[in-house]
Amino acid sequence: MKQLNDKQIAIIDNGINGRIVGTDKVQSKIFIDDYNNCKEDYIEIPITEFQHGTLCALIVKKYNPHCMLNSLRILDKDGNGRIEKIEPAFEWCYQNNITIVNLSFGTTNFNEYEKLRNLVNKYVNNGLIIVAATANSGFVTYPASLTNVIGIATTDSRLNYFKDYMQMGIDSFVPSEHIVKICDIETITSLSNSYAAPYMCALIANKLNNDKTLDIVKLKRYAKEQSHIEMTVECYEPDWIYRAYISGRGTMSRAEYYFETVTGVYDEIQGKIDTVIAYSMAELENLDIRNKNLIYLGHEDIHNIDVQGFIWSKETRQRQIKHNHYQGNGLEVPVVILAVEDVIDKFYILTELKRAFANGGYNAYTIGMEPECVLYALEYMPEPVSDIDAWKNFIESQTFYKQSDLVIWCIPVEEQDKYLKVYPDCDVQISLCNEGDINIVRFSFEGEKIEKKISGLIDRKDVEEIYHIIEAKLTEEEDG
């Protein structure tokens, strides 16, 4: 890994006007062209145009006057741009030894999540520190909501999502209204998450100047300490993995993990990984995981385990449910309950069904009841027994903030009668059972029943047919 420079800050935005910020403070000006090439940027944004990146630079300079700024222009004059330009911008930062990146923009489009997650995890694993603004709309934003990013929102917002900061992936609420000078005229930046992020970016840079040993985990905790709204609960989604070592053996599935895996003798490969995945405490006894992240899929209590990185276990989700503040009026999206027999590869079915809905333009909140499902970027939810209302409120909060179009809940086929009581008015009920070489799929739509037989191993084409049947039924009313 390169040793990056903590005195260098990159503002990835719509450009910085060097005359306003000061040419002595802007070390590099780069723009990403339509072919994703990095080139010298000679354009000076006219004073009459949107000075988004310039204002971000002025805020960083105000609170960290000793830093050097670097402008990477990937947005147009109106603040719009293509996500494909983020990768060459990150790569330029890495190649030029820049540690800290300010992103005062993001997307709420679920289709951009996977690409941004993979990019972020790659570059954070190589030393980049990314500070990003949450969307002003109050919905989950990428990349700000990702665990490996320091997600920022403004204080004094009209929205009340600060209570649900865990669901939003927000690490800190800080001011966005700052007095800066443009051509010797004082102006106050607007109430916007865009201008909260560079304030935190400056604080992070100051902190790193004083302590170069801080990693993303410690910096996120520092960001929480700086929040103007108290943030006491620490829960991170298990979306941070770049390369993992898996200790033990889980369920065999054809579904692909969302990350790379490294095999071999742990002592020989531990320098290549950022995360250890384990199924029991016994598997961890002889592994030095102090400086790693941990995904624990077992049942034991792991509160006393010595891990300095991010930790996720079943208890993480239970804590999120317990501390959820969102109160709505019930789910406003269709619910599909998928009862799958244990011998069938449920992880493959769920990932392929989620992918099929995404290809159709639908954001499916896809739930499994085994902690292992998080390895496939599926949602884990424990059995809803202790407090069903809290369980349902959490699902509602997730579908609201993530702007989901439907819920797919996978349950054991032998217990479907019990779990159907949670959503007795579900829109679609499906059972998937194996009878020798034949898989039987039974659909139930408000009394109407359809049966489909699949020979041999269920493949992508079979799942796509299941998707088309569900999609056709769910859109019948609006089409008709």
Image (cartoon, rainbow, N blue to C red):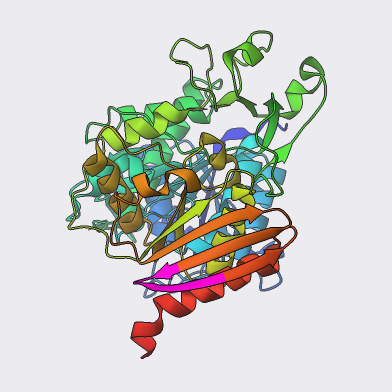
Q: Which residue lies furthest to the bottom in this view?
A: 480
Nearer to me, 307 or 416? 416
Nearer to me, 84 or 286? 286
The chief SS type of the magenta part is strand
**Residue depicted at x 78% and y 15%:** 267
Q: Is residue 107 above or below residue 259?
A: below
Give how far across and how far down residue 407 sits, in percent. 40, 59
Image quadrant in which you'd find residue 293 = top right
Give how far across and how far down residue 48 sits, in percent. 36, 75
**Residue depicted at x 65% and y 39%:** 242
Q: Report whether 157 appears left or right of 45.
A: left
Q: Report whether 381 appears left or right of 25.
A: left
Q: In this view, does 367 lie above or below 384?
A: below
Quadrant containing the N terminus is: top right
Q: In this view, does 166 lie above or below 278?
A: below
Whether residue 135 can be seen here: yes
Quadrant containing the C terminus is: bottom left
Give how far across and how far down residue 333 sits, in percent. 32, 65
Residue 365 falls inside the magenta stretch: no
Residue 446 falls inside the magenta stretch: yes
Whether residue 174 can be seen here: no
> Which region is colored magenta?
444-451
Give how far across and how far down residue 57 sits, in percent. 43, 51
Nearer to me, 457 or 442? 442
**Residue depicted at x 79% and y 23%:** 269
Q: Which residue lies furthest to the front in this view?
A: 435
